[in-house]
Each structure stands twice: as C-alpha cells, then as structure tokens.
C-alpha cells in the first residue's frame, strides 16, 4: 500500500535529498508539491510527477496526502507543522525543529493531540560510521567515555542554497532565527547525545559573526561560528564547533576518547571510522563516506521516514528524542548572549 507524500518547500534540501530519495523508496508516492516560488514546485512536478498546489491549505485538504515533508525556512517550521498535524497528516520536519523551545513543545502537543507522527530529519544519526560507532561505544570497545570533540563546518549557505548569494534566507534573522548553530550545530549537538546515549546538561558557548556579510556588506545578523563546551549527564565533557567559514574543505568529524582507546569518525580522508586501542593498534572500519555539499549520497532519511509511517513509530527520527538537543542549542545561545554557564534541566525553557 503506497503512502501519499506532499512536499512543502522545494528548496535545495528537498531538491537534492527529500524528493529524489523518496522517489525511489518503495511505497512512497510523491503526490504533490507546494513552494512559495511556484516555479520550483513546477520543476519538481515535471521531473518526478505529481501535482502542484496553489497553497498549503489545499495540500492539507487533499485526502490523497497521508504525510508531508516540511522544508521551509526555520521560522515557518512550527506553524506549518502544527497546521499539518491538526489536518491529520504525519510530518517529517527539517532541522532545526523550531526557533524556540516553546514552539518545539507546541509541535509535540499537536502531535500527541492529533495522534499523528512528528519526525525530525536529523540525518547524521543514520550515517553508517555513526551507527557503527554507537555500537562500539555501547559494547565498551573504548572503555568508559571521557571526552570528545565534534565539528561541522563548510563555506556557508550562500554557496549552497537554492538561491546562491548574500541575500540567502539563512542570513536573515527573521527567517533563520540563528545561523551556523541552527544550521550545522544542531546536527552535531544531536549526534553527540545519540552516540553517547545521554543528554547534555550544561553548556558554555560563544556564538559570533566573524566574516559573513549580507547584500549591504554589513556583518550578518546571525552567527557564522559557534563554539560550545558541553557537559553530559555522566560528567563527560567535550567540545562542539559549527562554522560557515571553513573555506576550502568541509569538516564533519567527531572523535570520542575513552579509557581504553578512541574512535575517529569521518576524521580521516577515505577512512570513515577508525578504532585506535590504548596500545596503539589501529583498525579501520569500512562504511559509506559522509555526505558533503559537493557529494550528496543517500541519507537514509526517506527509507526511515516510510518505515516509521508503516510501523507507526518514531524510530530514529522521533521529535521527542530531538527535544533535548534543541534545549541545548537554545541554552548555548543564552550562554553566549549572557556570558554564563547554563545548566539545562529536563524542562529547560531558555
């Protein structure tokens, strides 16, 4: 039985990931598309089939649509997701989940009240080396985890987004809310919790704008770099860096240090995962390469999305499991703004 999918937002992430990946997943039926700039929806319709909707309400009123992908600017995530859930549609929402913790909680409430699934596209969880590293950590291959550093940086969204240039919506605070932290930092914040199986409980952070300039040649209103020191529930402490100013080469690496060795994840060219024992023994483990902006491989999101819809479970993408990472992101912003260490209780509201 096929599942009717509607795409809300036909920007770059939908064009290179959600739409092409869903187009080849069994039981996924791309019913139609909506985009504020209609021509982009028309391009996707012509290429992959399906109809173009005049507005979001028309799509949500269509009984042929079972679930939607929300891939609009950050500021629209909560409003559109809640509307879709109330219309009886399951939702896969792009990251970041929303722009405030209150919005995240409202999205969760709408999912519970409607009985529909709310999933968040945290694709780094599904990368082969991350899945294998989590298994090795859980089995004790590096002993007790002590510390870590994880980073995600590239040359910036103005070089990658659907409309390249300094007027990209990523630089507009009213649409993006945050910069590199919401774009890239959420990935690695979520990932470190996923790998270690515990939440972040405290953060010291600096979010700053070092180089990016808008059309007016003034520094943009959101951060282009973020550096965080995270403390986990067990006391493990490490660093997370996200950046839009890594010119020349993308970095998407993580290193986990334990009492019996370490794991290098996407930290060596051509070697997705290395296990280095305390005695210096090196074991390279073959998995697929990490996605980059220049080399987009299958993310696994489409397959997991459909699997969740068929099994009626949140699987690896459940919004509930992403909430702690969102709390940490907002806490990092407060830490930077106020120059303080921020403790993050389970009910942290910012």
Image (cartoon, rainbow, N blue to C red):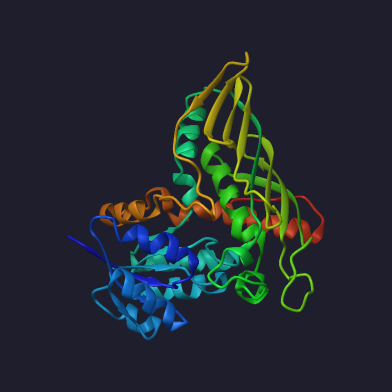
Residue 64 seen in this snapshot = yes
Q: Position of residue 176 (x, y in %)?
A: 62, 70
Residue 155, relative to residue 107: is it above or below?
Answer: above
Q: Position of residue 34 (x, y in %)?
A: 39, 78
Residue 217, relative to residue 101: is it above or below?
Answer: below
Q: Nearer the viewer, residue 59 or 272?
A: 272
Q: Quadrant of the C terminus?
A: bottom right
Determine the residue located farthest toward the top in the rendered image.
279
Determine the residue located farthest toward the bottom in the rendered image.
54
Residue 253 appears left or right of 223: left
Residue 345, relative to residue 146: is it above or below?
Answer: below
Residue 347 seen in this snapshot = no
Residue lying at 33% horizontally and 52% vertically, measured from the top left: 303
Quarter assignment of residue 85: bottom left
Q: Position of residue 9 (x, y in %)?
A: 45, 73
Q: Position of residue 184 (x, y in %)?
A: 60, 55
Q: Nearer the viewer, residue 324 or 345?
A: 324
Q: Quadrant of the N terminus?
A: bottom left
Residue 223, relative to residue 303: is it above or below?
Answer: below
Residue lying at 48% horizontally and 28% vertically, measured from the top left: 285
Residue lying at 66% horizontally and 57% vertically, measured from the top left: 155
């Amino acid at each position: 039985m096929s599942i009717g999918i509607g795409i809300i937002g036909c920007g770059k992430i939908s064009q290179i990931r959600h739409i092409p990946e869903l187009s080849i997943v069994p039981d996924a039926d791309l019913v139609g598309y909506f985009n504020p700039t209609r021509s982009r929806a028309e391009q996707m319709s012509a290429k992959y089939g399906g109809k173009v909707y005049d507005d979001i309400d028309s799509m949500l009123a269509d009984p042929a649509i079972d679930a939607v992908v929300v891939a609009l600017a950050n500021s629209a995530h909560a409003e559109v997701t809640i509307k879709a859930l109330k219309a009886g549609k399951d939702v896969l929402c792009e990251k970041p989940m929303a722009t405030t913790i209150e919005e995240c909680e409202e999205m969760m409430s709408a999912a519970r009240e409607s009985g529909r699934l709310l999933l968040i596209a945290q694709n780094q969880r599904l990368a082969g080396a991350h899945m294998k590293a989590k298994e090795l950590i859980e089995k004790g291959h590096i002993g007790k985890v002590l510390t870590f550093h994880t980073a995600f940086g590239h040359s910036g969204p103005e070089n990658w987004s659907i409309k390249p240039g300094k007027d990209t919506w990523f630089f507009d605070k009213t649409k993006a809310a945050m910069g590199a932290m919401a774009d890239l930092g959420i990935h690695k914040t979520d990932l470190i919790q996923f790998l270690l199986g515990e939440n972040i409980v405290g953060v010291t952070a600096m979010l700053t704008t070092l180089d990016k300039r808008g059309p007016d040649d003034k520094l943009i209103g959101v951060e282009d770099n973020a550096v965080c020191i995270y403390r986990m529930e067990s006391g493990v402490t490490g660093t997370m860096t996200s950046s839009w100013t890594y010119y020349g080469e993308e970095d998407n690496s993580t290193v986990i240090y334990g009492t019996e060795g370490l794991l290098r994840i996407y930290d060596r060219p051509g070697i997705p995962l290395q296990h280095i024992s305390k005695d210096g023994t090196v074991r390279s483990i073959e998995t697929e390469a990490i996605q980059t902006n220049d080399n987009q491989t299958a993310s696994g999101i489409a397959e997991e999305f459909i699997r969740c819809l068929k099994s009626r479970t949140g699987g690896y993408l459940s919004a509930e499991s992403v909430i702690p990472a969102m709390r940490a992101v907002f806490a990092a912003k407060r830490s930077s703004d106020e120059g303080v260490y921020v403790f993050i209780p389970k009910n942290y509201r910012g």
